[in-house]
Amino acid sequence: MSLDEDLYQERILEHFEQPFHRGHCPAATHMHEDDNPLCGDVVRLELAVDRAGVIQDAYFSGEGCCISQAAASMLVEKITGRRVDELKGFAAKDMLQLFGAPLTPNRQKCCLLGWRVLQQALYSPVNRA
Amino acid sequence: MTAPLDIERIRADFPILQTRLHANRVEGGVPLAFLDNAASTQHPRQVIQTIVRVFEHDYANVHRGIHSLSERSTELYEAAREQARAFINAADGTEIIFTRGTTEGINLVARSWGDSHLHPGDEILLTEMEHHSNLVPWHQLAARTGAIVRFVPITVDGQLVVDALDSLLTERTKIVALTHVSNVLGTINPVEAIIEKAHSHGAIVVIDAAQSVPHLVTDVQAMHCDFLAFSGHKMLGPTGIGVLYGRRELLETMPPFFGGGGMIRRVGLGGYEPGDLPAKFEAGTPPIVEAIALGTAIDYLQRLGLEAIHAHEVALGQLAYDRLSAIQGVRLLGPGPRRKSGIISFTLDGVHSHDVAQVLDHHGVAVRAGHHCTMPLHKRLGIAASVRASFYLYNTPEEIEQFAGAVNRVKHLFARKH
């Protein structure tokens, strides 16, 4: 039925089943993790930011629904090679647009989990004391 | 034994069951299969009409009014109390406290009886399958009094390890609080046996009956429970109304929970003297119309008979069990269908419960996904979330087929490449 394919479209299922950069970033300079206790979704982001403020490498990990994990995969793909100061202006509506498929308010929270984690991670340098 | 349910006739009483979903996106819409009854049930016309009738003809504040409408409202409100009393076979109407729901009932006991009886080192015994509403008030009570919360464990198939009570119950145990029917597993707990054991150690027993009173014959005198709480909105009634049953001897010695109008005998500038039961526990203007409508819901359930309702739900549960267990990757939680109420919860390998519920909704099937307010239980089962379908008197075998078909659809949607 079309309702299923509208949401769980090929592109989203691809990201869920064969995610971009799921794993850990050995050279991470910034990281953050958060969850949505209502459904148990977890997303962790690990970013390697160079001296010029460019994200050289990014990985995500975690578990949860198709929407939260596919959205995190899309986000990591999107931010790799981008500037931190530019991404600080990447808003929730930009994330929903990147995801593309129509979401009810409850599922928007799933989609925005990775985005929420990114906005924290950008301000969370790893302490390498 | 009552006659089997005439489902077609019953469904005609529930306007909302005619709903077709997604009509803006799917030609003709998709028929609704409402399988979220453990969260809240739908309302028959009779209940809706009571609400309209009372507002249009009988409404005024209850008690102490001299005018005709107040007398009429009071009479209807007290008649609903009598219906609730008879429904659970309480000995006396003064043992029926109207609350906002199960949660308020449990909080009332924890605050009023708990605060005045518990001391540091005393124990509160719960089970691993409790709803948060039968966990948090006891955690709060423990934090206030220095009491300790302990838990009766469950087996892998979601049944209480009743034998564990023999070592868990001691003279320190003051309160045993447990659910009659698990809101996730559907397990029907042997409350009578547990109450007997608890009483032999001097503990009082609080029964969370939110999932049992709507579905099973309840007799608080035969059960020998001390307190029992349930909600109107899980048994065809409105939200905002529930019942706390308490044994009169206990209620009489307990201090009031809420203070305000209606619960007093007299008030002075220096203090107050509480009123008699049940007014002592019903401060403020109560949910009058909701209580009266709950009476209509009780009447509707009694007319059909709880035995017939339970038999219908068990049959639907068996069908759902057969269909779901035939789907590879489905893991069913809780005991087999013969030993529980009409609740079936499961996980589907590789698919999060929210994705399952989303696709089911596309196919018209309303289920619940998540932890169902039982985070400790899900942790115990080693899962983050599950999908729950719960049945009631108006559900049909066709809806179970629609449900099982949609679960199959989820499986195929997510297993395209495997």
Image (cartoon, helix red, strand yellow):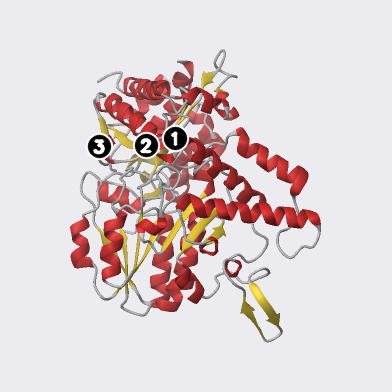
**What amino acid does circle 1 point to?**
Tyr
Q: Chain of mark 3?
A: B
Residue B81 at x, y percent in the picture: 58, 55
**Contact between labelled residues 2 and 1, with CB atoms less than 8 Å apart:** yes
Q: Badge 3 local density, few (<14 within 10 Å), some, or many (20+)?
A: some
**Which residue sits at x=61%, y=67%?**
B279
Query: The disc labelled 3 sits on which kind of residue?
Result: Gly
Q: Badge 2 is on which residue?
A: B342
Whole-percent x, y for residue B63 in the image:
71, 63
Q: Which residue is mark 3?
A: B336
In the displayed structure, does residue B226 sit left or right of residue B171? Answer: right
Q: From this viewpoint, is residue B188 visible?
A: yes
Three-letter code, disc 2: Gly
Secondary element under disc 2, as helix, strand or loop, is loop
- Per the model, the C-alpha gap separating discs 3 and 2 is 11 Å
Towards the viewer: B25 or A56? B25
**Residue A42 image offset from top left, x and y in percent:** 36, 45
